[in-house]
Image: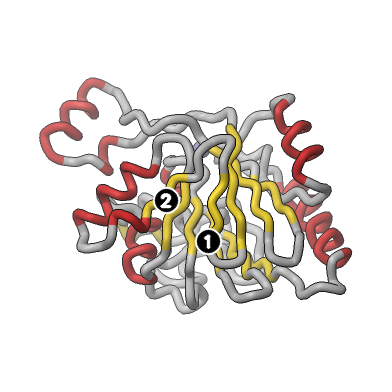
Amino acid sequence: MRTNSVVWMTLVGCTAALIAQVALAANVKVTPLGGQDGEFCPQGRALIFEDPIGTRILYDAGRTVAGPNDPRLGKIDIILVSHMHGDHVGNAHNKEPNSGSCTNPDVSVSALPNSNTVNIALAKKAKIVTGSEMPPFFAGKLKANGGDPKDSILARFGGSVKVGGVTIATVTALHSNGLDPDYIGGELGKNMKDAGIAGYVGEATGYVLTFSNGLVVYLSGDTGITSEQDTVVQQSGPARFGNSIARE
Ligand SMILES: [Zn+2]
C-alpha cells in the first residue's frame, strides 16, 4: 500500500533524464494519472506511456483513474496490469479527477465485479496485455460484458508480443497475486470468501517495454527486491521505471 515517494521521485527523475538521452528520436511521453493533478499522492498508480507513433499504454489503472469517462485518458490502445490487488487493477475509483484530497481521495465508486481495468478496456476497445495466468480472467470478463475475449492477450514469461509500436515482455515479480472473490461473485465467490481463500491467477508480473524509438522501460510492479531484477536491467538496457518499494 505504501509507496516510498523519495524512491519514486528519484526514478521519475532518472527516467526523465534517460528519455532525454534519446531526444534525437521522438520522445516517449509519460503522464501520471493520479488522484490530484500535479501531485504525488499515496494512491497514485496509473501512468500513460505514449509511443512516438501514437500507441498509448495505460499501466495499472488503479483507483485514481475516474473510470472509462475520465477525460484524461483519451485514446487507450493497451492496458497493462502488474497484479490483481485492488489498488492496481482497480476495485473502485475516483468519482472524478481531483475528487477528495491527496491523502484521502474519494474513491467511492465501486468497480466490482469487473474492475476499473476491464471497464476502461471495454469502453476504449483496448487490449489488456498481461502475463502469468491472468489473461483468461480478463478474457472472461470481457466476454461476459459484450467485449471480445481476444482483446485479452498473453505475454508469456520469456516471450513477448508487439502491439502498435511497442514490444511487451513480462518478467516475474515477487509479490502476492490472489484474486479477491469479490471479482468472482455468486455462490462460488461467497464460498471462497467464507473460506478465506483467493482465486489463483498465477504470479504477479513486471513488464519490459521496448518503444519504437528504442527506449526500454522496466515496470517492476510491486516486486520485492530480487536478484533477478539485476538481470532484467542488465539485459534490457539502461532505462528503468518502476515502484519496487511500493507494496499492497
Ligand atoms: Zn499489491
CA neighbours of label 1 inside 10 A, class few (<14), some (14 to 19), many (20+): some
Q: From this viewpoint, which residue is outermost toward the left? A: 187
Compare residues 173 and 197 and report the one nearer the observer: 173
Type of amino acid at the residue the image marks with label 1: Val
**Residue occupied by mark 1:** 163
Q: Is residue 137 left or right of residue 158?
A: left
Residue bearing mark 2: 153
Q: Taking 142 as reference, is 221 left or right?
A: right
Front residue (pair 36, 90): 90
Residue 154, percent across and down? 44, 45
> Is any atom of residue 88 visible in this view?
no
**Mark 2 to mark 1 CA distance (whole Å):** 10 Å
Say which quadrant the N terminus sits in.
Answer: top right
- Whichever of labels 2 and 1 marks the residue nearer the N terminus, that label is 2
Q: Work out whether 118 lies above or below 203.
A: below
- The image quarter containing residue 15 is bottom right
Residue most toward the top?
A: 195
Image point (64%, 75%), residue name = 53
Give me the residue at 23% from left, 55% from top. 143
Q: Is residue 76 left or right of residue 103?
A: left
User: Residue, x 31% and y 43% (percent of image)?
Assistant: 137
Is residue 226 in sight in this rendering? yes
Q: What kind of residue is marked 2?
A: Ile
Task: Find out if the beta carbon at label 2 lies less than 8 Å from the nearest ligand 1 atom.
Answer: no
